[in-house]
Image: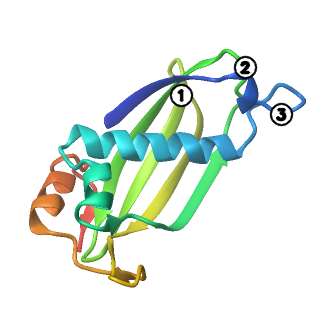
Amino acid sequence: MTGHTVNLKVHWGDTDMAGIIYYPNYFNWFNIGSHTLFESIGIPLKELMFEDKIALPILDVGCSFHKPLYFGDEIKVVTRVTEVREKVFRMEHEVYKGNELTGKGHELRSWVQFSQEGNLKACTIPDDVRSKMMAVMPATSVER
């Protein structure tokens, strides 16, 4: 289980009427995993957004669910960068209760810049950012 890990707890509002995790919360946890991974490798997203006018919108996302989670469960979200291309990158996430995988998913994100008018335009991921992302990639991952 290599990758950046965030420990979270399932809150009452995270569950549905049956007391089982409401599925969109997995995507929220993936987002938390992505943001904290970037912070951990020295890419502060708040600075990117407000100073550099860079955003990382999601182009594609998916999730598969293996085991239910319930109110009060303690979980780990493990996040990895698994692919870096010129203007997009892929992150993969796994959610565990103890050592048991409960769900996994992915995000494909683009590196975009806001124009003066507020429009978004994909741009090349800077070399320093690319090297930081590649430094945390598993050996079997892809760079393009």
> Which is more N-terminal, label 1 or label 2?
2
Q: CA distance from mark 2 to mark 3?
A: 10 Å
> Counting other residues with Cα less than 10 Å from the Cα at mark 3, is it few (<14), some (14-19), or many (20 or more)?
few
Q: Is residue 68 something one can see in this rendering?
A: no
Tell me the residue that label 2 is attached to: 71
Give the residue at x 70% y 26%.
69
Q: Secondary structure at mark 2?
A: loop
Which residue: 50% across, 21% down? 99
Q: Position of residue 118 (x, y in %)?
A: 41, 79
Left or right? Give the position of 127 relative to 34.
left
Say if 10 sits above or below 102 in the image: above
- Tell me whether circle 3 and circle 1 mark residues in contact (CB < 8 Å): no
Residue holding disc 3? 16
Q: Residue at x 20, y 43 (%)?
A: 41
Q: Is residue 13 above or below residue 26?
A: above
Q: Position of residue 68 (x, y in %)?
A: 73, 30
Circle 3: residue type: Asp
Residue 116 position, x and y percent, is 33, 82
The front one of 73 and 13 is 13
User: Which quarter shows the C terminus?
Assistant: bottom left
Q: Secondary structure at mark 3?
A: loop
SS type, badge 1: strand
Residue tagged 1: 96
Q: Quadrant of residue 10?
A: top right
> Dots 2 and 3: beta carbons under 8 Å?
no
In this rendering, which labeled residue sits more in front, label 2 or label 1?
2
Query: Dot 2, crowdedness within 10 Å: few (<14), some or many (≥20)?
Result: some
- Labels 3 and 1: the sequence-earlier one: 3
